[in-house]
Each structure stands twice: as C-alpha cells, then as structure tokens.
Image (cartoon, rainbow, N blue to C red):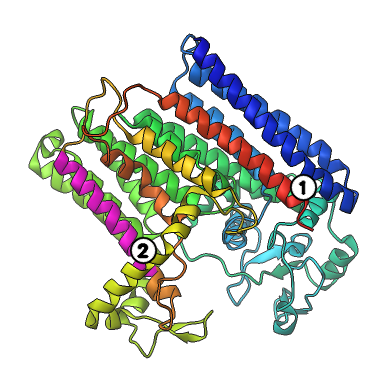
Amino acid sequence: MKKRSTSLIAGIMCLAAAAAWHSLDVRAGIHETGASWQMGRYLLLIVLVLVLTTVCGYFLLEKAVPCSLPKLAVLMTGGLGILYLFVLPPLTAPDEISHYVSAYRLSSQMTGQPQRDRYGRVLLRAQDAWIEDLNGDFVYEPDEDGNLQVTAESREQAAKLGETLEESTYELLHSLGLNGQYAPERTAEIEALGSYVSSTYPPVTTTPLAYVPQAIGISLARLLGLNTVSLLYFGRFCNLLFFVAMLYWSMKRIPFGKEVLFGVAVLPMSLHLAASFSYDVMILSCMFLLTAVCLDLAYERAQVRAWDIVLLAVLAAVAGPCKMVYAPMLGLCLLIPMQKFGKVRNWFISAFAVGIAWGMAMYLVNSQVIATYAAATEADSYVAWAGETGFSMSLLIHDPVLLVRMFYQTLLWNAKDMHITMIGGWLGNLDQVLDVPYLAVWTFTLCLTGLALKIPGEQLRMSGRHRVWTGFLCAACAGLTMLSMLIAWTPVSSRVILGVQGRYFLPFLPVLLLALKNQTVVLTKDKNRSILYLMCCLNGYALVRLFSIVCIRL
C-alpha cells in the first residue's frame, strides 16, 4: 500500500517538475509576443493534467478501490484525448484538412444543404472558407451555378489553418473564441458574391461511414448557428467520443490482453488521431473491436451466434474500404474453431457472409482505384508530387528482386522513423518540431512490451500455431501497407519506399503484441497497472511540453 502511494506521488512530483521547467519556455514566448493569457492557459493545462493523472493513478494503483480496466480506459483516453484536442488544435493532424472536408460534405448531406459543385468539389459556407485562406490571398470567380471557385493562380501561396502549428495559431483561436468570426469584412465580400465556396481540397475517396461521427459534430454546430471554431471542435470531439465508446466495447469483449489494448490506445499518436477529424479513428476502432470479437469467439465463447457474424460482417464492410491493406486482419476469424459454429455448413455460410460484406464494400467504394493500379503499366505510372515515373505492379511482378530490395532498404534505413511515427514522437502533421523526446518514445515502447509479457498465474490462451498465424497476418498487413506506398507514392529514383508512417501499424499492433506472449520471457510480478500509470504520466509530460513548444514557435 505504501509502495503504491509512493509511486503515485512520485509520478505527480515528476510531472509538476517538468511543468515548472517548461513554464520557462512559455514565459519566454510571452515576453516576445505579449500574449499573457497563454500563462493562464498553461496553468490550467497543468492543473488538468495533474488532476487527471492523480485520479487515474489512484484507481490504477490502489487495489482497495477496485475499478475495471474498461472504465479506466474511458477515463484516461477520454481525459487525455480532450487535452490533446486543445493542445494540438484543429487541422494540425496528418491530412486532417482533407478529412475535415470529407466530413463537411457528409454533414451537408445530413442537413439537406448543397454538398458538391458541378466539378465534384465540396461546398463550404462562406463563413467557413477562411480556414483554407488565412491571409486573404484567394481570388473567387462564380461558376455557372453561382458557387465561388478559387482561381488557380491565387491558390498557390494561400496559408491554411494548422498548416504549421505556431504561436500565432493559438493566438488566432484565442481571439476568435466560440463566437467570433474571422475577418468578417472579407466574409461579407464573399457572401456578396455567392453563398457557397468550393473547397480547394478534394474529399477522401472512401466510405462515407468513416466520417459519420465527425459529420454529426459539424451538423450540430451548424444547426446551433455556431462559428467555424466551434464547428471544428464539435467535429473532433464527436470523433473522440466514438473512439472512446468503441474502445470500451472492445475491452469489454476481449477475453485477455485488456492491458495491451489499453496501452496501444493511450499512445500519443493514437490519442492525437482520436482527437482529430482523421478516418484513422474508424479504422482503429473497427480493427480493435474485430480483434476483440475474434479472440472472444476463439478462446472464450462456447458457441458462435448469428449476431457475432453480423457484427464481424459490419466491421469488415466499414473498415475495409478505408484502407484495403488491412484485409488480412479478417484472417483472425480463422482462429475460431469450426465446431463452435454447430455445423460445417454454418461455418461456410458465416465465412461467405463476412467475405461478401468486405468484397461488396470494396467493390462499391474502391473498384476503380483497384482496377487502375492493377492495369497500370510502367509507362502509365506517374508520381505527381515528385514529377517522376513511379513503380507499377507489372514492373514489380517482372522484377521481384527489385521489390525485395526496396522492402529491405526501407526497413534498414527508415525503421527509426516508422518507430517514432507509430508511438507519436512527431505529432501535428508529422512535425519534427512538435516532438516527444526519443527517450520517451522508447519508454512507451518498453511499456507496451511489459504489458505484452506473461505475468505470474496467467494462462497462455494462444497456441504456438495460432501465434504464428497471427504474426503472419500482421506481417501481411505491414507488407501490403509498404507495397501500396511503393506503387502510389514512391518515384523510381528513390532507394526506399516513401510515405510509410508508423501510425499505419497501429490497427494490428494489439494482436501482434498478444501473439508475442510466451513462456520463456515472464514478468516476476504483475506490474500492468503501474505500467499504465507510467504511460499516463508520460502523456501528461508530452502535453505540457508540446504547449510550451508552440508558445515559443514564433
């Protein structure tokens, strides 16, 4: 009891010391800008971090106060997610503006508003157009329907909200608050020309189901007549709520490894994505629940119910079109013993139902993309951002040595970057200035490793054969991820595969860690809750550090 209390107090004291140290950076930023309000926000952040860490630590470490891990996951991921939501403000996450535009389009459909112009571009309200043009560089011309189009010449130099997270971003959001309007005179000029503005960012080609939570938040803000800042935060907050709810469901359903799932969910990258517009939230949530259901049916439930098959089919249909590289995760269904279906016929019907759900969803959403990549020749492949020829499937099929070389060199030279971007060492739009120290990244990694190890009295549920199969599925997901970036993003002049980010490995990371559990390396004591408390403290440190970095980034 005394030792646990000492650990709790030590964590709080370390956080307080780190917060005091980084307050020097906040003061330095205020000295340059005169934005004295930032110290008040920083102190509020410190208080919230310390309170949340104290409460989570109390429930994690004090055995006299029992609290289930699923409930603790809601408390910790929800609390930390809200703090990440405000420390890393709207449109700073990877590709977030494209996800925002996609959610905005779905919101317009929900509320009965015009959603696209004749060219397929998403229509925004005139009052919301400023987030793509902070400096007023856009020149608008009305099209045949009265919607405003941005001229190509004026589009090049425009700055968007969150493109680079600096002190000025905090200053802008503070000045606007939840009721202010950015550059009202400019908005009035735009509204005089037309009611809707065509976004310069294309929506993401995927299932609209990936944006339902975000679109609900945007729709609520629009129906309440709130400003753009509120609209942005409402959409992000609803996405976070969905992530927390799905995590709770997954942790209630998974028969073992709750701590591992919990640990992956509270990585800085996971929390940053959860508190953004990213459709990665839908992918993570569905893959977490798919993992939990498959393991529950394989090792816990006595019989597979029709509802379980429906749930698996829905998860496959929703997550599949978002990123088809996670299709091998459906192989986890093969862990379920055939006798639990009652009859062989039922097993085939179930497999067909899940497979057809995934196949139909892929066909409806991604058939054109798949056909384009499959039919592309070396002459057709072109990487637009690099202005060079790219790799094609036909080239790789005829030269498999080249494929192996590219995979090998990527793992050899880019493993560190993938590690950092999986844990969350570079946040924002993979901004290396908004960093979590590499020592902290490795501490998070060791925490995940500790959670994955066998503890005294724990029974190994996965057989060696099942662990090998699970490892193969995870390797297949990673391989397909790298292959997709090789074809879609890498010019032939590159010696490594470009664009491979560690966050792409998060959906299958929990089950991969569970497959590593073995009888050879075993913890002598159960320290899982202490490890989770350490991860909470590390997130608190990351939050105060990130806030101070933004304050001095002038």
Please tell me which residue is depicted at 86% across the width and 41% down the height of the picture: 37
Between 93 and 440, the one lying in front of the other is: 440
Task: Work out whether 258 lies above or below 415.
Answer: above
Would you identify the image quadrant in which residue 68 lies? Answer: top left
Amino acid beneath label 1: Leu
Q: Position of residue 63 (x, y in %)?
A: 46, 12
Please tell me which residue is depicted at 65% across the width and 38% down the height of the picture: 83
Q: Secondary structure at mark 1?
A: loop
Mark 2 Cα within 10 Å, few/some/many (few <14, many 20+)? some
Q: Residue furthest bottom?
A: 379
Query: What range is drawn magenta here?
Result: 464-484
Would residue 304 be seen by someone viewing this image from the given angle?
Answer: no
Gap in angstroms between the C-alphas marked 2 and 1 = 47 Å
| Dominant secondary structure, magenta | helix
Q: Position of residue 14 (x, y in %)?
A: 63, 29
Q: Secondary structure at mark 2?
A: helix
N-term mark: 2 or 1? 1
Q: Position of residue 385 (x, y in %)?
A: 54, 79
Mark 1 Cα within 10 Å, few/some/many (few <14, many 20+)? some
Task: Work out whether 386 lies above or below 548.
Answer: below
Task: Work out whether 100 lies above or below 288.
Answer: below
Residue under label 2, please give it. Answer: 411
Would you identify the image quadrant in which residue 240 lies? Answer: top right
Residue under label 1, please give it. Answer: 226
Between 59 and 123, the one lying in front of the other is: 59
Quarter of the picture holding the C terminus: bottom right
Q: Is residue 215 left or right of residue 365?
A: right
Please tell me which residue is depicted at 33% across the width and 86% down the height of the picture: 377
Q: Is residue 150 left or right of residue 396?
A: right
Tags 2 and 1 touching, CB below 8 Å = no
